Amino acid sequence: MLKNIWLFIASLAFYAYGEPKYVFLMVIVIAINYLMGLLMQKTTVVTGRKIILLMTIVVNVGILGWFKYASFIIGEMNRIAKTAVSLPMEIVLPIGISFFTFQAMSYVFDIYKGDVVAEKNPLYVGLYVSLFPQLIAGPIVRYTTVADQIQHRKENMDLFSEGVIRFLKGLVKKVIIANNMAVVADAVWGLIIGDRLEASVALAWIGAISYTLQILFDFSGYSDMAIGLGRMFGFKFEENFNYPYIADCVTDFWRRWHISLSSWFRDYVYIPLGGSKRGIARTVLNLFVVWLLTGIWHGANWTFVVWGLMYFIVLVIEKLLGIRPGKNKFIGHIYTLFVVTLGWVLFRSESLKDAGIYIRGMFGIGSPSVIDSAAIAYLKQNIIYYLLAIVGCVPIPRFVTQHIPKKGIMCILYNGMYMLVLGVAVIVAISFIINKAYNPFIYFNF
């Protein structure tokens, strides 16, 4: 009990360090969902349970909507109606609100489905929602995953050392690869001047690929750090990434990317709507709802909405054509990377206009040249980071560990080499942190 009290207080302090006033908002979210869970557990009438479920959705989505979308909605209304309506207060987006509200809602949803029993001790629910390793940017953890761990976990040195290694691996991903990719991506996007991208076709693609690599190693790096920290405290969180850039179709990509969010929408939106069991028309409608909500979840900007709907169109086409993992792997892999890279251009751009300008530049429309000295310079300056990123995109460590004996000299040599490389990489990462400006994680914005 004492270790849970301490961890709960530490988690609130961690959040308060970045968002002092919004720690009270998170406590309110915890209290609301804790009470909704108790009400759901005590209510046996189907209509009553549905009302409680609806109340849970309205309150949580209402809180999320106010902080994340109110300014955007008012701004769009003013733009369309030519009015000048303003909000009574300035709204600052609380860090990680999309993650902890979705996590809190899933607790009540699982009680409604009968997958978990409502927790009478508010400390356990509070710790579940506020647990600091994954509080800010996921993975979105289910209460069913950690309920027993909260109450009965036992820390040990094996789990702690495993967590340390995983944390350091995530740190290296973020600092050495993601941050250096960000330098290139930010520089190229900065070349959008007026109605043109003042960059060659090659440089435009280098910028797009750099962001494609940046967001993978930024977000998966954070997930590694969160999973590692969790293991240090005795928690085993589920994986959030599974080498998404080796996917050979977009459907497979979304089974590998941000797994906790994809499974959240699958289990709490797509399947309750009927999934793919009510005919093709209903399946398409359900996919539309899921991907519209996925785009909106990522932010208050039309770029995210179009990004989500782009994936809706692609996934419907794949479903109708019967495209699935394992068919035409090489061609499928190239096609998937092409679609995903274009998607990240939409995701990264500040507006649909900028996205259009950038994509036109990638295909030579209005570009000053096909290749220029700047493109060559960026490649030369960052070649080591691109090579590291490419290696990090494929499951080489997994392949090696599967073929290395669990005992013996080969195992000792491999583990020793792995720790040596990781140790050197950590030293380099620390030197980067000391010498360079702070770069926040991309998903802190969501």
Image: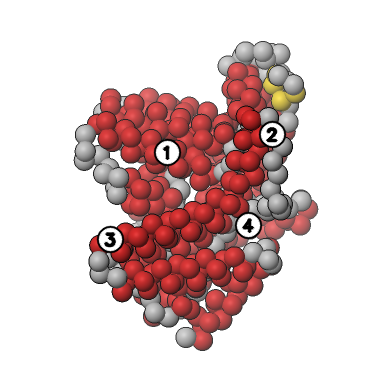
Q: Tell whether label 2 touches label 3 (CB within 8 Å).
A: no
Q: With respect to residue 224, does 118 lie above or below?
A: below
How far across and down, in percent of the image, does residue 106 sit? 40, 60
Pointer 4 residue: 94
Q: Which residue lies furthest to the bottom in this view?
A: 2
What is the number of the mark on residue 47? 3
Residues packed near mark 2 inside 10 Å, few (<14), some (14 to 19) or many (20 plus)? few
Question: Which of 366/178 is in front?
Answer: 366
Q: Identify residue type, mark 4.
A: Pro
Q: Which of marks 3 and 1 is nearer the N terminus?
A: 3
Nearest to the eye among marks 3 and 4: give it. 3
Nearest to the eye among marks 3 and 1: give it. 3
Question: Which of 251/107 is in front?
Answer: 107
What is the number of the mark on residue 291? 1
Q: Earlier in the sequence, mark 3 or mark 2?
A: 3
Marks 3/1: CA distance? 29 Å
Q: With respect to residue 2, does 314 lie above or below?
A: above
Q: For numbered disc 2, what is the local secondary structure?
A: loop
Marks 3/2: CA distance? 42 Å
Residues packed near mark 1 inside 10 Å, few (<14), some (14 to 19) or many (20 plus)? many
Work out whether residue 242 can be spotted. no
